[in-house]
Amino acid sequence: MKPDLLLVGNATPRMLEAMTGAFTLHRLKEIGDLEAFLTEKGEAIVAVATNGHDGLKPEIMARLPNLKIISCFGVGYDAIDANAAAARGVMVTHTPDVLNADVANTAIMLMLAVSRRVVVDDAYVRAGRWPKEGAAPLRQSIEGKRVGILGLGRIGETIARKLAAFDCEIVYHTRNRKPDTPYRYYGNLVDMAKDVDFLVVITPGGAATRHLVNRAVIDALGPEGTLVNVGRGSVVDEAELVAALKDGRLGAAGLDVFEDEPRVPEALFAMENVVLLPHVGSATVETRRAMGDLTVENLLRFFADGKAVTPVPECKGLQA
Ligand code: NDP
């Protein structure tokens, strides 16, 4: 008898194939009457596969009394209550490291796209304006600029390392100073924002980081500063961000994530100093494949020998 797995959200064909080989798969999006399903099958479900956006709603988790593991496709798991899961003895896993390079590349791509106005200049060429109006205006370079990284974890470190190729000066803010990095530490985020050209947000989401980037931080970054957010939309006070861009109190922004995805404030659409992406930090064929493989591997290993490959910190104590 294969164990019963509930799939929340989508999965790639490769993941589906691997999961159906080892589990009896129930796809949430194909379940018409959720109440009837939970009544009939809730006790049988021992595993959930989900992603960082859909997570697992507490009211569904409460109806799965024999749940043993939640495997998250994504490194950010703020949409899953990992503390509540750990308290129930439910393992939660995620996909760290395999996406570091592509998310870091996305952050640097946004820095370049914003400072060189690549979207604006591309539109200029496509509209046939170049032959009529001549050369496009000069833009700002990222070369040698000072970059403040908010969240110097796995991805933040990768961004810092890659920015060495642009001779950028790296500084950072985290709650805990990191003893082994060459970069200058700021214990105060406003102080760091005052001193940098770019502020790159790459912390987890959730209550602890909500609106860390508030009006004071945005104003400290100032009219010459650029905000890049590849972490979570919730970390930035989006209303304040939009207001600061409208007033010219903030220079520019490159955003991959938003507070209420997939809804993006329409006020941003007309701004030439803003580049907007639909949460695609890790969205390459190569990285998504690695993330999918790790999501499935966590499930398979857990049921084979009780040891998940990449448990979230809250659940490390549950390892057999
Ligand atoms: P890590 O856990 O390795 O790093 C997180 C960093 O954030 C640590 O340096 C941590 O330091 C810091 N941090 C956490 N809380 C705070 C706080 N309250 N104030 C200041 N700093 C804080 O995570 P990863 O680098 O692997 O991933 C980071 C996040 O990036 C994910 O959780 C996810 O939300 C986001 N992400 C976005 C993607 C996208 O598609 N745009 C793709 C992948 C990830 P300390 O604990 O010392 O404070």
Image (spheres, rainbow, N blue to C red):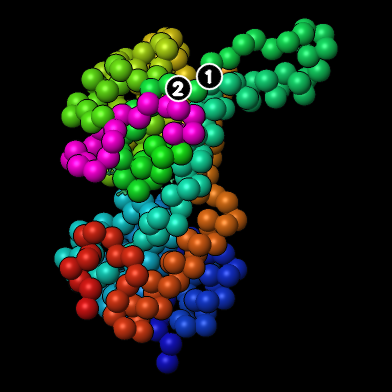
Q: Is mark 2 within 8 Å of ligand 1?
A: no
Q: Amino acid at mark 2?
A: Gly
Are the residues tagged 1 and 2 within 8 Å (C-beta)? yes
The front one of 267 and 131 is: 131
Secondary structure under badge 1?
A: loop
**Lateral position of residue 88 relative to residue 291, left or right:** left
Q: Which portion, as a residue range, is magenta?
A: 163-183
Is 81 situated above or below 122? below
- Residue closer to the observer: 113 or 208: 113
Q: Residue at x 49, y 68 (%)?
A: 293
The residue identified by callout 2 is 144
Residue in the image at 22% along x and 65% along y: 315
Residue 205 lies, with reference to residue 128, above or below; the image says below
Residue located farthest toward the bottom when viewing the structure as drawn: 1
Pointer 1 residue: 141
Q: Could you tell me residue 299's position as x and y percent?
A: 39, 74
Q: CA distance from mark 1 to mark 2?
A: 8 Å
Q: Residue at x 45, y 71 (%)?
A: 296
